[in-house]
Image (cartoon, grey):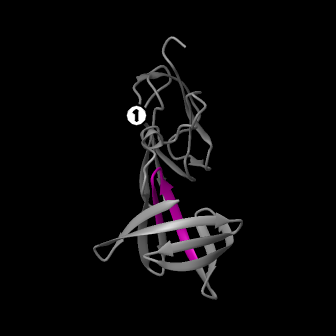
Amino acid sequence: MKLVYSHNAQTHTLDVTRAGDEFEITVNGEHARVQVISFAPPRLAFLYNGKIVTARVASDGQKRWIHMDGATLVLERAEPNTARAQTHGAREGTGSGIVIAPMPGQVRAVLVQEGDAVTAGQPLALLEAMKMELKVSAPHDGIVSKIYVTQGQSVEREQILTEVTKRGG
């Protein structure tokens, strides 16, 4: 997978290859091997150059925020998957209209009610995770048939938030 990030006004490209609990990372021609020790979102601990490093990770579709050693890096896919970005929170490939939480967090607002007509990409709910606000959007045009969460509720990754039924379907 190719990722890009900016640091000190320079853009860098990372090539990341996974092999079990290890990752081969190439940045600007330099190679490194990273071994994951534990990953209990949002906390990640890994071994790099003989040193244990702890980081906090959050994601929002195409972006990953990694906070470690007092700095935050924002990584983005070099080749974005625009379909996924537009239907953030929807289960990919199912066409079911089930909208899930892309990461653990807290529901800050439910922006629709059962029975509301929505359009593809329309925000349905706002989540907060690691002090970031994330809009969860409708996967397609339709009617909100079920809301499974309430404002203030904590949610787990891939917990069902809402369901949108296609019009006429």
**Point 40% across, 34% down: residue:** 121
Instruction: Judge whether 164 appears above or below 83 on screen.
Output: above
Q: Is residue 168 left or right of residue 157?
A: left
Residue 130 appears in view: no
Q: Main secondary structure of the magenta part?
A: strand
Q: Tell me where residue 20 sits by quadrant.
A: bottom right
**Point 46% across, 37% down: residue:** 87
Rendered location of residue 9, percent (x, y) = 28, 73
Instruction: Judge whether 115 appears above or below 134 on screen.
Output: above
Residue 148 appears in view: yes
Asked if residue 58 is among those painted magenta in the image, a careful observer would answer: yes
> Which amino acid does the dot numbered 1 rest on?
Gly
Judge the density around disc 1: few (<14), some (14-19), many (≥20) Cα neighbours within 10 Å. some
The outermost residue toward the right is 20
Rendered location of residue 32, percent (x, y) = 56, 79
**Point 41% across, 52% down: residue:** 133
Q: Is residue 152 left or right of residue 159?
A: left
Dot 1 falls on a residue whose secondary structure is loop
Point out the stretch of residues depicted in magenta. 54-65
Q: Tell me where residue 23 sits by quadrant.
A: bottom right
**Point 50% across, 56% down: residue:** 59
Q: Tell me where residue 169 sits by quadrant.
A: top right
Which residue is label 1 attached to?
Answer: 121
Rendered location of residue 47, percent (x, y) = 64, 80
